[in-house]
Image (spheres, grey):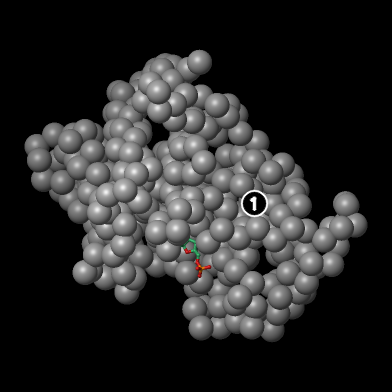
């Protein structure tokens, strides 16, 4: 059994010039994840369910557990001394850490501390999503440009899923590996080495409640999924949890496609490029899948502002390309 810490150290040896800073950041993320996991698992028993008085920059009611998780990841990354700043879904702007070691640190981290908030109070899987970039600004306080890099510049990305078991899945651009938390020893242990996503799948994942607001190409792809799968001649199954981490995790393991497209009333869709789409796109590509906006690879998008959104088609390559074919066939409709 290999623990996450042992794995991180082993993999660090693959990079002779590694300073250990990236390893340290990953370890601190996993530590914060264990603390959040403890609260998520007993959420029903303590006064941490429900909403705070606050609304975030997206106009969403901030759940107590959102706020708790946000503070845990911020504090853990600040204390590491290895990260010069963060951008969080729960923060209006990026946070530059001003303690001495952090000012000299070479990395920034973006995260959605607890994605899927609407599921928290009903005990459905939720998750944390993170990205790690090398800073591009000179040493000292980090700058906004550090957080607006293309997804191709990520040195690592991952997620933690707080589900039937708690897992941390991450990549440092050298394959994708999954670790399951063993509560009896308090360690994440390697359980899913070298995750490769099936080339196709039998599930599609989209909020069909918005069908009237989808472009025609998306509606036609949904109808295709409902009618037949070329390989099995059977319809696809619809699986939609409403928690991106859980929906993406299922796709990684079973194959399938996750779609959050542009809507007539939300042309860029709902999901955020910097701390949801980019980290997941790197993960999907590292597992051999495809992640596009429907017209271009998500990782090639150049963010222009921290909380911008983008449409999402990600999952098994064959299914993403089939969806893209429908978008081309009905372009402009
Ligand atoms: P909808 C959760 O709020 C989230 O940001 C993602 O985790 C999830 O995929 C999406 O929104 C669900 O959105 O509009 O279908 O409820």
Q: Residue at x 74, y 49 (%)?
A: 201
Q: Is residue 219 visible?
A: yes
Residue 108 on image: x %, y % = 29, 44
Residue, far right = 233
Pick the front one: 196 or 282: 196
Q: Camera-side residue: 252 or 24?
A: 252
Q: Position of residue 65 (x, y in %)?
A: 30, 54
Q: Crowding at label 1, few (<14), some or many (≥20) Cα neighbours within 10 Å? A: many
Instruction: Give left or right: position of 172 versus 146.
Output: right
Residue 278: in sight, yes or no?
A: no
Q: Is residue 61 left or right of residue 214?
A: left
x%, y% of residue 241? 56, 58
Mark 1: secondary structure: strand
Q: Quadrant of residue 122?
A: bottom left
The foreground one among 156 and 31 is: 31
Residue receiving disc 1? 315
Residue at (72% x, 64% y) in the render? 323
From the viewer's side, name the closer residue of 22 and 276. Answer: 276
Residue at image point 70% right, 61% down: 238
Q: Is mark 1 within 8 Å of ligand 1?
A: no
Q: Is residue 92 left or right of residue 43?
A: left
From the viewer's perspective, is 307 left or right of 161?
Answer: left
Q: Is residue 61 above or below residue 85?
A: below
Q: Residue at x 29, y 65 (%)?
A: 51
- Callout count: 1
């Amino acid at each position: 059994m290999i623990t996450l810490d042992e794995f991180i150290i082993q993999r660090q040896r693959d990079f002779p010039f590694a300073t250990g800073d990236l390893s340290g950041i990953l370890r601190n993320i996993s530590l914060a994840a264990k603390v959040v996991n403890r609260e998520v698992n007993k959420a029903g028993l303590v006064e941490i369910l429900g909403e705070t008085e606050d609304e975030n920059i997206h106009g969403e009611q901030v759940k107590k557990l959102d706020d708790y998780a946000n503070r845990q990841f911020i504090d853990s990354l600040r204390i590491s001394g290895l990260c010069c700043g963060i951008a969080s879904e729960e923060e209006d702007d990026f946070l530059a850490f001003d303690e001495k070691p952090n000012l000299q640190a070479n990395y920034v981290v973006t995260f959605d501390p607890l994605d899927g908030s609407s599921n928290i109070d009903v005990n459905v899987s939720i998750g944390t999503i993170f990205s790690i970039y090398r800073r591009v600004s000179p040493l000292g306080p980090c700058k906004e440009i550090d957080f607006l890099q293309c997804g191709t510049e990520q040195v690592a990305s991952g997620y933690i899923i707080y589900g039937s078991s708690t897992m941390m899945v991450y990549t440092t651009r050298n394959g994708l590996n999954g670790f399951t938390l063993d509560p009896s020893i308090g360690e994440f242990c390697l359980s899913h080495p070298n995750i490769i996503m099936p080339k196709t799948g039998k599930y599609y994942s989209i909020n069909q409640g918005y069908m009237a607001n989808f472009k025609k190409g998306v509606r036609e792809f949904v109808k295709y999924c409902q009618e037949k799968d070329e390989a099995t001649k059977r319809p696809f199954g619809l699986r939609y949890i409403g928690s991106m981490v859980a929906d993406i995790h299922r796709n990684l393991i079973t194959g399938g496609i996750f779609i959050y497209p542009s809507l007539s009333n939300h042309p860029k869709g709902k999901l955020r490029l910097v701390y949801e789409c980019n980290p997941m796109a790197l993960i999907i590509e590292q597992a051999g899948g495809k992640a596009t906006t429907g017209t271009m690879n998500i990782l090639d998008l150049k963010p222009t502002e921290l909380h911008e959104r983008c449409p999402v088609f990600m999952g098994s390559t064959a299914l993403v390309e089939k969806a893209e074919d429908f978008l081309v066939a009905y372009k402009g409709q």
